[in-house]
Amino acid sequence: MKLLFDIGNSTIKCALADGAKLIDQALTLTDTDFDGLGKLWMDGEAPEGVFAARVGATALTDALAQWTKAELGLPINFVTPSADALGLKTLYKDPEKLGVDRWLAAIAGFRLTDSNVCVVDIGTAITLDVVLGDGVHVGGLIAPGEGLIARALAQGTADLPMAAGIQRQGLALETRQAIGLGISEMIGGLLDRLHHRVTQSYPGLYFDWLITGGGGARCDWSGPAYCYVPDLVLQGLAAVAEESARA
């Protein structure tokens, strides 16, 4: 059994894995109080290995590394992208500079569908990664997420507050709702453009669409049918950790 951490820009998500499969849902951590992690394996043996994907949260990462060493006697194995892993080959010019979260989500998406797949991660940033049915990762796109857009608007304009909620229909009659509606429409428009770009780039190919990330559950998109998979990064990390254990 392995303990997994997805260390993002805003939060840390963690889960246990048995082989390449996650056990139960992930927990989300927002501070350095890690004592509750022991509840994950309360009725079983403690983890035999710790693996992490890191894109941010340096202070939390340092505190987490100290905790795993003190409580489990284990270091954290930080995974990094590679050009060829678990059937996925990336065409990225410098694979090590492909975000580890994007790489892991692409691996998990391809393993789930075993077909042409578009993986959209809606979090602090919005990312798209496209993998063809032969396992070739052909690239993607990065855009600011809901929170970054809202903060930029609040900081860069006079007397505009942070957005409040998302209005699904009609027009807003209050400034914070108007900002929330504008951001929602921007993200929906971006997703429509992503779909158009993929279909224009690969005419005649059918793609499965998977959406992940904290903002994915709030996604309001009228594009192609998609499946929301909240923990794709952790699923990819579980697969990479299992492969590492076998090596």
Image (spheres, grey):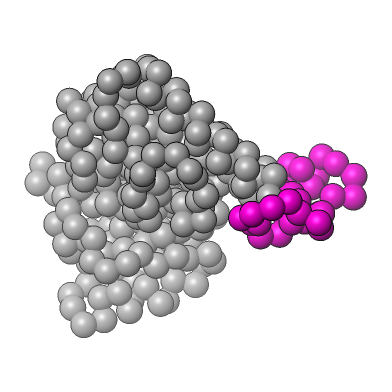
Magenta stretch: dominant secondary structure: loop
Q: Nearer the viewer, residue 134 or 225?
A: 225
Q: Report which quarter residue 66 is drawn in.
A: bottom left
Instruction: Identify the image quadrant of residue 92.
Output: top left
Identity of the residue drawn at 82% across and 40% down: 156
Query: Going 34% across and 29% down the picture, which residue do you hit?
Result: 130
The correct choice, above or below, for 181 with respect to 49 in the image is above
Q: Which residues are drawn in magenta?
A: 150-179
Mark yes or no: residue 178 visible: yes
Looking at the image, which residue is at 69% across and 44% down?
A: 182
Residue 147 in percent (x, y) is at: 63, 49
Residue at the left extreme, as displayed: 246
Outermost residue on the right side: it is 158
User: Is 73 situated above or below 56?
Assistant: below
Residue situated in front as seen by the camera: 195 or 21: 195
Is 15 covered by the magenta stretch? Answer: no
Residue 143, image x, y percentages: 56, 34
Q: Where's residue 5, x and y in %?
A: 36, 56
52 up-or-down from 79: above or below: below
Along the line of sight, the residue nearer the viewer: 19 or 65: 19
Image quarter in which the N terminus is found: bottom left
Q: Residue at x 62, y 42 (%)?
A: 185
Quick one: quadrant of the C terminus?
top left
Looking at the image, which residue sits at the far bottom? Answer: 43
Q: Is residue 80 visible?
A: no
Is 152 within the magenta?
yes
Residue 44 percent coordinates (x, y) = 18, 78
For the image shown, how many numbered marks are present on the structure?
Answer: 0
